[in-house]
Amino acid sequence: MTIALTSSTPIWLFLFAIFINKPMQGNECMSKTTEANHANAATKSVADIPLPAGYRRLPQSAGTFGAWLRTMSLKQDNKVYLYNGQLKGNQQAQYAVLDISVGNKDLQQCADAVMRLYAEYLYAQKSFGKISFNATDGTKMDYSDWMKGDRFILKDNHLRKVRQAAPASGQACFAQYLETVFSWAGTMSLSKELIPVKDTRKLLPGDVFIRGGAPGHAVIVMDVAEDAMGERVFLLAQSYMPAQNIHVLKNPGAATPWYPAGFSGKLLTPEWVFDANELTRFP
């Protein structure tokens, strides 16, 4: 509302004009304050995790798995919860928690979390034909056929692909597919699909340290940085048993969550010890 003031304007109208402008000025200040608060509380991602002094993030081309992993949002609540909503007993392993669902079933454990992230990346790229994992018995479980209506039935101790559902797509369809993958695949099957990486000095975002077995374990390299000499450091993330939030791990031997690459012996993580020769990569 605008009031034109002149020398003949009554004093009461002049005061009224000042009064109605105050809330407008106040709201403007409140708006700026709110914007500042929102900026401070902006969602952080893996790319915001501070680097060790002297390091810079390894360049990743747009559209790659490594570039996508860096965009993963982090929860403000740094606690790790199980699939049933209970707190994980050990709250000392995580540096940060990824803002991605764990589901309400005890399914998304260690290898499942790795497959989840890779599948979500391919889904975001609309590369539906590349979303495929093998069950422990070797049965190929591909998302393309799942969308066409194929389902996997256990018969004579072997999974059988049967066309029994109507064609579907979308997030609900994708979530159901992932639950099926988590039910029938694990560290043993995933370890056979991945390609060994012989030199830990050359590890990349998206690589996986994995030991197939029962028990086995898998962690994924979320980010990589290097210094002027080309020495690399990396971040790791995991889920575990029971199914729980995927979380960026602390490095038990350092003040930061970054692990030094180029080792040839053991990789000590908060809840598992890997060998250097257990580093792998998606084909």
Image (spheres, grey):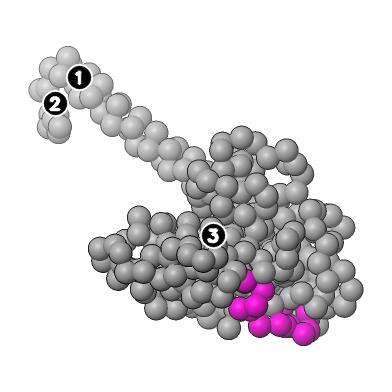
Task: Name the front one of labels 1 and 3.
Answer: 3
Give how far apart the Cα atoms at labels 1 and 3 are.
Answer: 68 Å
Q: Which residue is mark 1?
A: 16
Q: Which residue is at the front of the view, 213 or 47?
A: 213
Residue 275 x/y as whole percent = 83, 71
Residue range highlighted in magenta: 189-204
Q: Amino acid at mark 1?
A: Phe
Quadrant for residue 17, please give it. top left
Image-based side of 270 in relation to 36, left or right:
right
**Residue extending furthest right?**
265
Q: Which residue is at the front of the view, 161 or 230?
A: 161
Q: Which residue is mark 2?
A: 7
The residue drawn where x is 32% and y is 69% is 163
Q: Which residue is at the front of the view, 20 or 119?
A: 119
Residue 174 located within the stretch drawn in magenta: no
Q: Amino acid at mark 3?
A: Phe
Badge 1 marks a residue whose secondary structure is helix
